[in-house]
Amino acid sequence: MLVEFDGSPFSGWQKQANAPSVQQHIQEALAVIEGRHVQVVAAGRTDAGVHAEAMIAHADVSAGRWQCSDRAYVHGTNSHLPESIRIVAVRAVAPDFHARFDCRERAYTYRIWNRTTASALHAWRHWWMPRHLDVDRMREAAAHVKGRHDFSALRAAGCQASGAVRTIRELNIWRDGCEVCISVRADAFLYHMVRNLVGNLVEAGIGKMTPAAFGELIDSGDRKLGAATAPAHGLYFADAVYDDFAARRMLEAEAAKGSVV
């Protein structure tokens, strides 16, 4: 399933006992269709408040019902979901496919509202930064993290990964009017890695940290020396890449269908 959601009302992706989650809502919607409990697994487990433009999740469903109408798993599931969650597209995969463990590349986008006044329309979708951001300085700082590094300096204390070495394959920063966007693509991410990366890039952008100092921070491996973690509501899960398909390509294909008159 290609899943899109507004993370504002949820405690995150993962089902929890006493808080609403994206996983819980999708599992309950599929249970209505299937008449049984259906386990749903996502490519990434987002935090409370984090959004998704193109998340991949998998579930085992009835082969007979699928062959009768695979689109029923789009429209049927959506009819039982809150408006803040949408199944955008579906496709069949191998019986042993795993949305999390088979994913070989993930991407996130972080959105910052860079204006002296906050936005009335985007308050829960951007991090409001009233101080001017120098995008060129941010790009210069970002050059220090491209490639394969030990990212302990961007790793949250609660991270359960066995190691901190990751490869950032692509990192782009651009301005579009009042919006500054940071997109990052990697083989995998550590807990809060993107939000900690953004927090430090913003420090560079407002002049509180030099690009060279950011490079020294990465080399130090010391999270305590870095900037505060950027808030969750500016972060979007943007892509999940597998051997034979990718979330973003599925999203583009759906958009192309919608553009046919």
Image (spheres, helix red, strand yellow):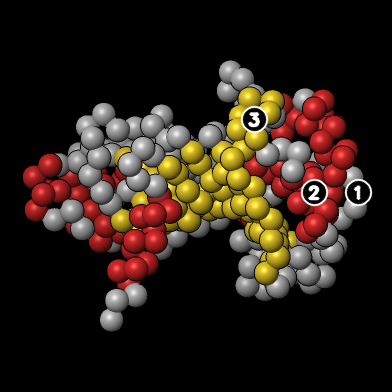
- Amino acid carrying label 1: it is Lys
Q: CA distance from mark 2 to mark 1?
A: 14 Å
Q: Which mark is residue 244?
A: none
Residue 205, image quadrant: bottom right
What residue appears at the point 83 percent right and 59 percent down from the top-left corner? 134
User: Mark 2 sits on what residue?
Assistant: 140
Label 2 CA crowd tier, 10 Å (few <14, some 14–19, many 20+): some
105 or 77, nearer to the observer: 105
User: Mark 3 sits on what residue?
Assistant: 148
Q: Is residue 145 above or below residue 133?
A: above
The residue mark sitting in front, 2 or 1, is 2
Q: Residue 22: x and y, percent?
A: 43, 47
What residue appears at the point 12 percent right and 42 percent down from the top-left corner? 63
Disc 1 is placed on an element classified as loop
Q: Residue 227: x and y, percent?
A: 81, 41
Q: Is residue 238 above or below residue 40?
A: below
- Amino acid carrying label 2: it is Glu
Label 3 CA crowd tier, 10 Å (few <14, some 14–19, many 20+): few
Q: Residue 256: x and y, percent?
A: 34, 68
Q: CA distance from mark 2 to mark 3?
A: 17 Å
83 to the left or right of 149: left
Disc 3 is placed on an element classified as strand
Badges 2 and 1: C-beta atoms under 8 Å apart? no
Q: Earlier in the sequence, mark 2 or mark 3?
A: 2
166 to the left or right of 42: right
What residue appears at the point 43 percent right and 53 percent down from the top-left corner? 248
User: Mark 1 sits on what residue?
Assistant: 208
Q: Residue furthest bottom?
A: 261
Q: CA distance from mark 1 to mark 3?
A: 26 Å
